[in-house]
Image: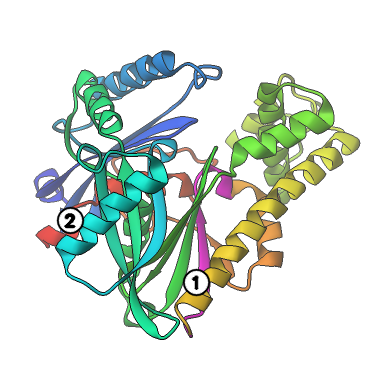
Amino acid sequence: MIGWKLKTRDLRPIGLDIGHNSIKMIQLAMNGEQISILAADKVRVEAGINGDEEARRSFVISAIKQMLAKGKFRGRNVVSCLPNDKLRMTSLRLAETVADEIEHALKKEAGRRFGLDPKEDVVNYLVAGNVQDGGDIKNELILFAASDETIRSHIAMLEEAQLEPVAIDTVPCALFRSFEKSRRREEDKDQTVVFVDVGSQFTTVVFGRGGEISFIKQIPIGGEKFNREIASKLGVSIDKAEILREKLQMESSAKAAGISVSKSSPPRDDRAVSVLQAGQDGNALDTSTQQVMVDAIGAAAEDLAKEISLCLRYYTVTFRGELVGRAVFSGGEAYERILLDVLRRHLTAKVEVAQPLKGLDISNVRFDNNRRLLCEWSVAVGLGLKGWEGQR
């Protein structure tokens, strides 16, 4: 067992992922190549507050304070990311030129496309690589932009929650960093992989090769669309649809594990207890309801799979000859088996579910045993790793 002093030799800032449905905090420590998790906590966002900006802000601040008060996190430095709906992203091409000219052109483009003020608002970019455009070679760039008001409001919220922000990141960059930590083998370096985080409102798609991001796409489809489809087909509320979908997932997992979900059979372990407690009673979903839900989720999943397929097509055309070998999925919706089945039918790349905590020492923390892959922690881990490569 590694001693405490050794584990905290390189203490990282807290990685804070404020999602639509949950808030996740994680803190890492480094000892050479070994990464240890010192603390981690997760709070589910209360239903009904996401439509009220002030209520949501108050809830987030209170939840962060509660997690900090438990005493497992060390220090108050934090790296967080802007929410997807507050960040503007796009790809564009410019003739090869010097950095100052690129920055000027991108600020002008951000103003034109997003209505931002080039002098006040924040604009940044990544160079994705050189591409053939007609008879010319141009720079493929990824533009990130956010209003000054968004940045200031985000920082004020963190400070009110008694945190000290040391960096603000984006979901795509954090996602890519989380996966890159485990892609250090020589054979991985030249392989193009697409990383996909399926959240509640948005799906973030990131292509990476050789340790660099080469394409990013944000798709406005996520778990909420699955819930809306179910609500429409069954004639129930969105909240009820979410409960039913969670129950369907748990029943499917229990069935695959050989666990009975009937009332007459007593629960044999924690997974069975979770299944029996899902929804409003302990009864299993009837067959007709299950089929309606499967069809509704499948229809929404088909839409998402088509959008991801278009991303793959754009990438292979833009970066000629670079085929994508794997598609790695993370986020809370990566547990949706119906979605994964649809993706495996549509995508040419091999579909995998992420394991962001694989290879990390998690002996200091306890995670939800029902989520053994813990793929919803990918962004938080990536935030916790920000700056580590530079220090190494």
Q: Residue at x 59, y 44 (%)?
A: 221
* Rendered image: mark on residue 281: none
**Secondary element at tag 1:** helix
Q: Position of residue 353 (x, y in %)?
A: 53, 58
Q: Which mark is residue 315?
A: 1
- What is the CA distance from the residue labelled 2 to the residue labelled 1? 29 Å
Amino acid beneath label 2: Trp
Q: Are marks 2 and 1 in contact (CB under 8 Å)?
A: no
User: In front here: 248 or 372?
Assistant: 248
**Callout 1 amino acid:** Tyr
Whether residue 32 is visible here, answered yes or no, is no
Q: Is residue 241 magenta?
A: no
Residue 351 lies in quadrant: bottom right
- Residue 216: where, in percent of width, then height? 43, 59
Q: Residue at x 67, y 27 (%)?
A: 243
> Which quadrant, please, contains the C terminus?
bottom left
Q: Does the segment drawn in magenta span residue 325?
A: yes
Q: Please state if 277 lies on the left or on the right of 219 as rendered.
A: right
- The residue sitting at 23% across, 28% down in the picture is 152
Front one among 316 and 325: 316
Q: Is residue 60 left or right of residue 238?
A: left
Q: Which residues are magenta?
A: 321-334
Q: Which residue is mark 2?
A: 388
Q: Position of residue 210 (x, y in %)?
A: 32, 75
